[in-house]
Amino acid sequence: MNVKLHTFASYRKTMSKILTDTTEVVVRFGEVDSMGIVWHGNYVKYIEEGRESFGKKYGISYLDIYKHNVMAPVVNMNIDFKKQVQYGDVLLIETEFVNSESAKMIFKFRIFRKSDNELVATSESTQVFIDINKEMILYPPQFLLDWKKKVGL
C-alpha cells in the first residue's frame, strides 16, 4: 500500500490558490542609522512597497479600493528582524495575500537581501475596511468578494 505524505505547504497549495508578488527596493543613504545599518522603522516603508506592488499586480491597490468609497487602514503589523541590512543593499520584498473570510486583508512578507538571498526580516500586516465616514465595515465589501472570485480565491 502506497501512502503519500503531504507537508502543510503542499496541502495548502492544493486547497487554495496563493497570490504572491516580489518587488525590489534599494536601501538609500537616508535610511541607515549612525551604525551604518538600516534603521528598524524603515522596514515599514519596505513592507508598504511590497503591498503597493502586490496591489498593482493583482488590481487591489489603494486606489482600486478607494474607488469604492472604502479605505483600508493598517490595524496590526509585526516585524521579526533576522539580519542587518546596509546602505546600497538591494532587497527583495515577497508579499503573500492571506485569504480570510473576515472583512480584512492580511499580508505576509519575507524580505531577502538579493546579493546572498539571506532572509533579513519577516512580517505580517492586517488591514480592515472603513467607509468614507471612517465607520468600520463589518462584512467583506462586495468589491473584495468580486476581486477574490476574479483572482480565483
Image (cartoon, rainbow, N blue to C red):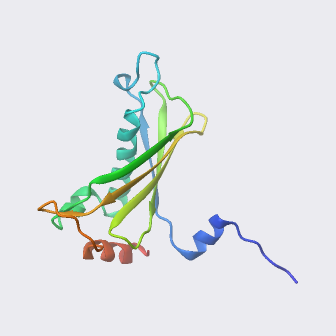
Looking at the rendered image, the quarter that the C terminus falls into is: bottom left
What residue is rendered at 42% in x and 30% in y? 27
> Among all residues in the image, which is located at the extreme bottom?
1
Where does residue 68 sit, x and y in percent of width and height?
Answer: 18, 68
Residue in the image at 26% along x and 76% along y: 142
Give how far across and how far down residue 127 sits, in percent: 33, 57
Q: How many marks?
A: 0
Residue at the right extreme of this rendering: 1
Outermost residue, top side: 34
Picture quarter with the N terminus:
bottom right
User: From what the image shows, is residue 106 above or below residue 118?
Assistant: below
Which of these two is toward me, 93 or 128? 128
Q: Residue at the spot x=36%, y=76% of the render?
A: 150
Q: Position of residue 25 (x, y in %)?
A: 41, 38
Vertical side of 95 occupied by 46: above or below: above
Q: Tell me: 60 left or right of 96.
A: left
Q: Nearer the viewer, residue 133 or 37?
A: 133
Residue drawn at x 21%, y 58% is 63
Left or right placement of residue 68 versus residue 2 in this view: left
In x, y percent, where is residue 20?
47, 59
Quadrant in which residue 144 is drawn: bottom left
- Against 85, residue 114 (above or below) is below
Judge whether 109 appears above or below 101 on screen: above
Residue 59 occupies which quadrant of the picture? bottom left
